[in-house]
Image (cartoon, grey):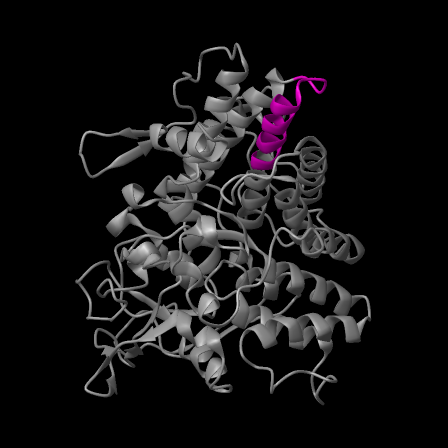
Amino acid sequence: MKANDFYKYILSGALILGASACEETFAPSTAIEETSALTNAGDVETATIGTYAVLRNPSYVRSVHFLTEFPSDEVAQGQSSSDDLTRAYRYTHINTSSHCTNFWGQAYKVIAAANKIIAYVPDDASADLKQLKGENLYLRAMMHYNLVRVFGRPYPQGSGAGPGVPILRDGLSDEETTGLSRSSVKEVYDFVIADLLKAADLMTVDKGNSFASKEVAYALLSRVYLYKEDNENAVKYADLVINSGRYSLLDGANFQGYFKMDPETNSETIMCIRHTKVQNQDFSAIGSMYFSGDVAGNPAGQGVSGWGEIYASEKLVNQYALHPKDLRKSFITPYVLNGVLQKNLKLTPQTPMYYVNKYNLQESIINLSSPVYLRLAEMYLNRAEANAKLGKTAAALADVNIIRTRAGLDDALYTSVPAGKTALDIVLEERWMELAFEGHRSYDLFRNNRSMIRNYPGTHSLNNTPTTNVNQTVPATDARVIFFIPQSEIDKNSKLTQNP
């Protein structure tokens, strides 16, 4: 059996069906019980694939998406929802948020499962075991980093001195978080960087894009260093990914179909959370909030498949409209009937129904997608932002132009910085258009001390009434740019302090 086929087999085996045939639950291991000892390389491989499977749990992947994407100005909620996502979207956070609770619990389950393998495999093990140890170091780093983004303030605010999240170090289980206090943001970043550097050294196998590898670790290092404002290292690790030759930007029709294709054939994706046809989550999928339509991608109003409650913001749609040839408009599907753009009628002013399809229609299944965590375009934009901050304007604009050329804007490239803008303004605007709906926007603004400005129809007013105000501005220093630590965790651990 080929390696990739084996991984597909194990991934399928990692799903343990629940009481209902249409529900899936995910365990942090497959044939290996969490309380059992690892005894051989086969155990380590099986347990590692089981740990990857936890990432597909809606309690992780759906919740972390809502927490990272919905506070942005790329999306508009068209109606009230019973889902806790409304509070994430409107910045009306509570300490009993179901999505925060889900995300925290699942992330630490992944870390604990990774710790078990990290502790088992010695540094002088075989190459195969070193590879698996590296993958688990990567997963541990990824989880700590995602946690500190959601619950700790942006690194530049106080140079990481503020409280972050507990660090679950080697040998500790998720139950042992109950005795840990919050490490500082800086300490979490330093831990993440150390794990990623070691992971990169240990990994020598180029697996598919749903698994960690050396370049996957480098890509996340580029992002982490950028968020930390270590711009030289952000450039260094973006260069290592770009120059590796493993990835290439899609263009033309292939780019327009980026998120619909089988992820394993996608040359631009560095890492995704892989879902297959048999793992379609339907109404619990991320895309169920973004789209309602048929398998051909034609919108058909609410209730056909999915909830269709979250739309692309009019602000972002208008930005794309500045350049009619921009291929990125393909990721937004206006709901038009008889030539008229439809609006959600449940609020006044009514919200234009611009469906987002980045999380739908993979392999022609309406709510199937494999959410992309890292891709090559981000590496160019990481490098561009870092170079802009280093005063290397020409290099920053060159990378922005690579992304704009791919988007079909070869007649709208930058030869200089326009009056009234900075090189950083240009890069952040391009990140907004290129990485929309992928969980970057609010972090890009807040870590650069910029406000989130929502001046378009949607329920983002703090007072959701039929005459709601469509304007909301959230300063980068606002307490609610981060989320409350789940109260259930504080109840279990007196050492945890709550965010103000």
**On the picture, is 229 further left or further right than 100?**
right
Q: How many marks?
A: 0
Q: Is residue 42 magenta?
A: no
At x 24% / y 62%, what residue is drawn? Answer: 295
In the depicted view, which residue is nearer to us: 166 or 237? 237
At x 65% / y 65%, what residue is drawn? Answer: 381
At x 60% / y 66%, what residue is drawn? Answer: 445
> Which quadrant of the figure has residue 384?
bottom right
**On the picture, is 498 further left or further right than 491?**
right
Q: Position of residue 136 (x, y in %)?
A: 57, 30
In the depicted view, which residue is nearer to us: 221 or 264? 264
Range of the magenta residues? 122-139
In the depicted view, which residue is nearer to us: 318 or 408? 408
> Which quadrant of the figure has residue 234?
bottom right
> Would residue 195 be seen by someone viewing this image from the given angle?
yes
The N terminus appears in which quarter of the rendering?
top left
Q: Main secondary structure of the magenta part?
A: helix
> Would residue 155 be seen by someone viewing this image from the given angle?
no
With respect to residue 327, does 179 lie above or below? above
In the depicted view, which residue is nearer to us: 369 or 421? 369
> Which quadrant of the figure has residue 90?
bottom left
Q: Position of residue 390 (x, y in %)?
A: 81, 66
With respect to residue 498, does 332 lie above or below? below
**On the picture, is 362 further left or further right than 255?**
left
Q: Position of residue 280 (x, y in %)?
A: 29, 46
